[in-house]
Image (cartoon, rainbow, N blue to C red):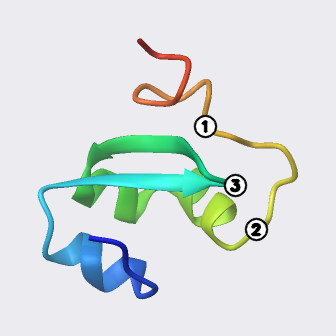
Amino acid sequence: MVEQKASRALQISDVGYVLNTGRVAFVGPAADLLASERVKRVYRGEGGKDTGAEMPGGPDDE
């Protein structure tokens, strides 16, 4: 599901993916994404180039 109300979508989901400029920035249990300060910064466009690459489940974690 693609949803503009991300917090609501994560509340009813088991797993979530957060995209930043068309790339997966974060993936993980919805409750963890909902609570993550890093996810909130990326979703709101704050934090500059923070792509989530260092976070488990980020784009470089294959």
Instruction: Say which residue label 1 marks.
Output: 52
Say what amino acid the circle numbered 1 marks.
Gly
Q: Residue at x 79, y 65 (%)?
A: 46
- Foreground of the two, 57 or 32: 57
On residue 45, the disc is 2
The quadrant in which the C terminus is found is top left
Instruction: Examine the rendered structure and indicate whether residue 1 appears above or below residue 52.
Output: below
Distance from the alpha carbon under mark 1 to that under mark 2: 13 Å
Q: Residue furthest right?
A: 48
Q: Residue 27, position in %: x, y? A: 37, 42
Q: Is residue 56 left or right of residue 42?
A: left
Q: Which secondary structure lies at badge 3? A: loop
Please report contact status of discs 1 and 2: CB closer than 8 Å, yes or no. Answer: no
Residue most extreme to the top: 62
Looking at the image, tell me whether mark 1 or mark 2 is earlier in sequence order.
2
Reading the chain from its start, which is encountered first: label 1 or label 3? 3
Disc 2 marks a residue whose amino acid type is: Gly
Distance of mark 1 from mark 3, alpha carbons? Answer: 12 Å
Taking the spot 12% from the left edge, 57% from the top edge, the residue there is 14
Q: Is residue 22 left or right of residue 48?
A: left
Q: Which residue is mark 3?
A: 21
Q: CA distance from mark 3 to mark 2?
A: 10 Å
Q: Earlier in the sequence, mark 3 or mark 2?
A: 3
**In the picture, residue 31 is in which quadrant?**
bottom left
**Amino acid, disc 3:** Thr
